[in-house]
Each structure stands twice: as structure tokens, then as C-alpha cells.
Amino acid sequence: MKKILAILTIFILSTGICFADELNDKINILYAENNIKEAFTLLLSIPEEERSAQNWLLMGNILQDEGKNDDAAFMYNRAISIDEKYYKAYYNLGNIYMLQDKPNMAIQAYKKAVKYNPEFAYGYYNLGCAYLKAGKVKSAKWEFYKALDLNNQVADFHYNLAYTFKQLNKEKQAKQYLDNYNKIIERGQ
């Protein structure tokens, strides 16, 4: 009898996990297809205590898309409370802080994003942008270098590094990265 109960319990739990996976897949598809309202409704149907960090992140993304930045920040913080190493939530939180003109808070969020995913080029890039906004031009330069080390084919990385060198009165380096930017743009057209 105990074996039957154990097997039944495992079956019920695995069915619940499969259902949750299917629901999350459906939510992700709806979100990717820009069916935002239905995705959000499905997210709300998941009890709060059962929501994953990804669920909270998507809710934050939807709210941010609607211009509800404070609510989005709350959702990103909920994602972080579930998975303290969830770099995407820190990155999105940094983006909110940049929109709110809080570069020092953005710097802290982006630092955690790249700490938990050191291969995240856009994390370094946005960290550089936050440093620029905070007036820390030399720090910005190093973050743009890190972004370029990871992906040197993103035109904006070169452009912002050119701008940074311009701010540092390094015209030769500024021109070099501006030329790189223009070459990438030309190849893309």
C-alpha cells in the first residue's frame, strides 16, 4: 500500500510539474507573439508562491512596456528574491533605474548582472552607459572595453566608446572607434 501511495504521489507531483512547464511554455509563446494581455492573465493565474523568477521577470517586462516602471521594478525584485543570481532581473532593474535617472542605483544593478553572468556583453555596455550618466567617464571606458571583448560587432558599443574617448579628449581613439561604428553600420545596410 505504501508503494502505491508513493508512486501515486510521484505521479501527481510530476503531472503538476509538467502542467507548470506547459503553462510556462504557453506564457513564453504568447509573450513572444506579443499577445501581452493573455500572457499577463496566465501569469496572474499562477499562485504567487508558485511563480518562478522567470514568471516575475515577464510580469515586470509587461508592466515596463506599459510604462508602469515602479510596478515593474517591484516584479524584478520579486524575481531576485526567488533567485538572487538571476542576472536578467538585475539587468532589467538597472534599465528601470536609468529611465528614472538614478544612475548610481543602475550601476549597482548592472554590476550584479555581470557578476552573475560575466559573458553578458549588454550588461557591461549598460554599466558603461550608467557610469557615463553618473559622470564616471574612465569607469565607463573600461566597461565598454569589456562589452567589446565579448562582442565587437555591436555598433553602439563602438559608438559609446568613441564618445567616451571624446569626453576624455582622446581624439585619435575617438576617431578609431567612430570609424569602427561606421563600418559596422555600412555592413548592416
Image: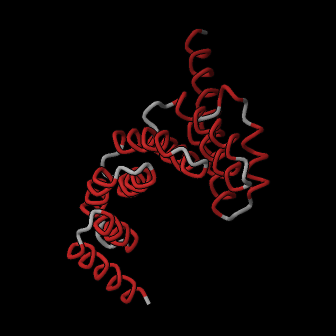
| Residue lying at the far front of the rendered structure | 169
Classify residue 152 as left or right of residue 64.
Answer: left
Q: Is residue 23 visible?
A: no
- Count of numbered badges drawn on the protein: 0
Q: How is colour applied across the structure in the image?
A: secondary structure
Report x, y in % for residue 40: 75, 48
In the rendered view, would you say 115 is above or below 134? above
Quarter of the image where one finds residue 10: top right
Outermost residue toward the top in this view? 2
Q: Nearer the viewer, residue 16 or 66?
A: 66
Q: Is residue 152 above or below residue 58?
A: below
Instruction: Give whichever of 55, 122 is nearer the camera.
Output: 122
Return the x and y of residue 105 as percentages of the image width and height: 49, 39
Relative depth, front residue between 60 and 161 = 161
Specify the quadrant that holds the N terminus: top right
The picture quadrant where one finds residue 162 is bottom left
- Quadrant the C terminus occupies: bottom left
Q: Nearer the viewer, residue 76 or 53?
A: 76
**x, y (%) of residue 27?**
67, 51
Residue occupying the far left of the picture:
172
